[in-house]
Amino acid sequence: MMRSDPSPEVQSLTCGEPPETVCTVRGFCLSNYLTSISALSTSQGQARTIISATRFDGLSKPRLLDAYSGEGGATRGYMDAGFEVTAVDISRKALSHNPAPRRYVADAIRFIRDHGAEYDLIHTSPPCQRYTRGTAAIDRSGYPDLIEQTRWVLEDVGRPFIIENVQDARAHLHEPTLLCGTMFGMVVADDDGRLMHLRRHRLFETTFDLQAPRGCHHKITRQVGGAYGGARRDKDEARLVRKGGYVPSVAVLRKMMGNLYSMSQEGIFECIPPVYAEWIGRAWLRTTTPVA
């Protein structure tokens, strides 16, 4: 089956090339585009139909677009599941850590609009700062609210998709599935040898059936490890005073999140563990019948 490569007008950052060779996609009026497809959906009086069939022919790797990819926790997981992944983000710095063989500095919504139909599956992780508890004490109005806009463009393109976000974004997602580190047995030893597990609840809206591997398994007797900025890092205070979790050292953090040794601390704080994406990718593959 013939597949078209992404447009040459958007330059690729391939492994080994310096980030400076990547061009940012410009000249796109997001508000006008979103207004037009929203009006179209309203005039039709019905929800858009998502194409459930795939173009995947079963002979080559299925193609996945990882939009708002960051440093690539999801990217790596989908690659582990057997996908050919293209990563898109507005940050050159983040993409320099991303393991995808094709990486584009671009607006995620525009890239999905222009190239989304070239992929078998699209994963998106719109910015979470609008909803996360880490920004609850400050004015959130300056953070982008892109979940609904991302869904509009995904539905307009018509490919199977995933929208990922934090637990407090549940009201903005359609029947999401929750994944947690304890569902995957994500346990590591801290610097002092004490075992700690990763909770890291994340929600996933999908256009295909997605089930969690099991329920959360939070042991009261086991220390909780976190992976987010602005958190307390004093293990003694966490264990003896608050009786809660804390963010361990960077070395332990990388192991706890799935051996993310190529990522920066900031990248780890913002990503999902690769095992989440691998689980989702394999779930989609189980529901897919290759096109002859």
Image (cartoon, rainbow, N blue to C red):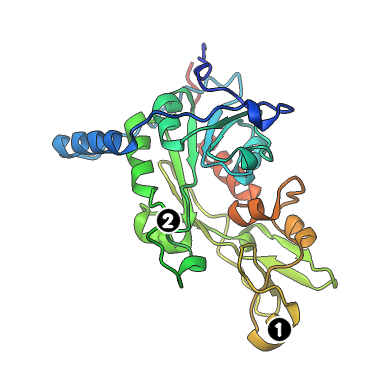
Q: Could you say where residue 169 lies in the image, as x and y percent from the top left?
A: 41, 59
> Can residue 288 be spotted in the picture?
no
Q: Amino acid at mark 1?
A: Glu
Tags 2 and 1 in contact by the CB under 8 Å rule? no
Q: Which residue is mark 2?
A: 143
Which secondary structure lies at badge 2?
loop
User: Could you say which quadrant of the image residue 207 lies in?
Assistant: top left
Q: Is 30 placed above or below 231 here?
A: above
Q: Which residue is nearer to you in this view: 267 or 154?
A: 267
- At label 1, counting other C-alpha atoms closer than 10 Å, the crowd grade (few under 14, some 14-19, many 20 or more) is some
Gap between marks 2 and 1, in whole Å?
32 Å
Residue at (65%, 57%) from the top-left corner?
Answer: 184
As drawn, which residue projects farthest toward the bottom?
Answer: 241
Q: Which residue is mark 1?
A: 237
Q: Could you say where residue 249 lies in the image, as x and y percent from the top left?
A: 77, 65
Q: Could you say where residue 56 lies in the image, as x and y percent from the top left?
A: 51, 23
Residue at (41%, 36%) from the top-left corner?
Answer: 109
Q: Which residue is nearer to you in this view: 257 or 267?
A: 267
Q: Amino acid at mark 2?
A: Tyr
Which secondary structure lies at badge 1?
helix
- At label 2, counting other C-alpha atoms closer than 10 Å, the crowd grade (few under 14, some 14-19, many 20 or more) is few
Q: Which residue is nearer to you in this view: 247 or 74?
A: 247
Position of 220 with respect to 189 (left or right) is left
